[in-house]
Amino acid sequence: MSKQDDVKVMLREAGILFAITLLSGLLLGFVYELTRESRRLQQEKAVQEACAAVFSGEEFKNVVFEQDSFVPSEALQQSLAQTGVTIGTVFDAKAGDGSLLGYVMESTSANGYGGDIVLYVGIRLDGTVNGVKILEMSETPGLGQEAPNVLTPQFAGKKVDSFTYTKTGAKADNEVDAITSATVTTKAVTEAVNGALAAAEELPGGGAQNE
């Protein structure tokens, strides 16, 4: 086979590869656009379920969640950034008569063992943590993945300025028991909850200092 034939073969194979790549990209783009609305609705449903989960209880029936325009102060954002925490969407939790019951804060820690941990924190007007729900995480199965069952329930019903974790057994309301062999996950979740509490202090009527 001559060099000219070799070039023709190479060009033909390159053209085929290019066509396959282009077609694959177009198909992926088409599927992405086709499922965009479905994914958006699923995400909204997951968020609403998370809000309902952190504001559950006999005294919280028929609660309505309305997105708040709250943005943390620059000083708070800088402070939280030092712990890898960012505050996302905030929802007002309102009773059927429109009265404000508290807030649901989206808080994300970038310091999870497997990456970002996104959780929602329900905070009553007096600063009590009503509940914590983890929406997204990629922690180690059997270790950090136990956070929703082992760690988050420990925050519920607690009214403190901030939480800390311990490996020797919680002895105070502001202490939570770390997950065995998952200190990184425990620390990330605790810092995310603390970030939500700090942000709630800046909201109207929110936080223990505004009782």
Image (cartoon, grey):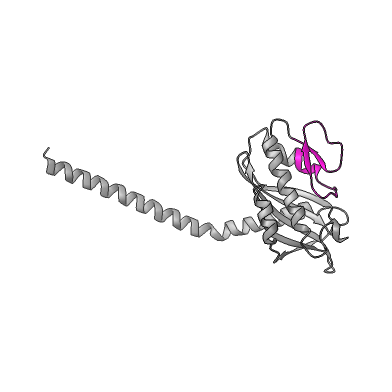
Quadrant of the image occupied by residue 126:
bottom right
- Which picture quadrant has residue 88? bottom right
Looking at the figure, which quarter contains the C terminus? Answer: bottom right
The range drawn in magenta is: 150-178
Residue lying farthest bottom? 97
- Point out residue 96 in the picture as x, y percentages from the top left corner: 83, 66
Residue 30 in the image: state x and y as whole percent: 45, 58
Whether residue 132 appears in this view of the structure is yes
User: In the depicted view, which residue is nearer to us: 152 or 13?
Assistant: 152
Residue at the image position 16 percent from the left and 41 percent from the top? 6
Residue 39 position by quadrant: bottom right
Main SS category, magenta section: loop
Image quarter (top left, top right, bottom left or bottom right) of the N terminus: top left
- Residue 28 is left or right of residue 187, and the answer is left
Q: Residue at x 80, y 65 (%)?
A: 204
Q: Residue at x 85, y 56 (%)?
A: 208
Position of 63 with respect to 211 (left or right) is left
141 w.r.t. 128: above or below:
above
Q: Residue at x 66, y 55 (%)?
A: 78
Whether 155 is among the magenta residues is yes
Number of labels in the image equals 0
- In the depicted view, which residue is nearer to us: 57 or 146? 146
Tell me where residue 81 appears, x and y as whole percent. Answer: 65, 51
Residue 118 magenta-highlighted: no
Does residue 46 appear anywhere in the picture?
no
Tell me residue 87's x, y (percent).
68, 56
Comparing 98 with 31, the one in front is 98
Compared to 57, does 70 lie above or below?
below
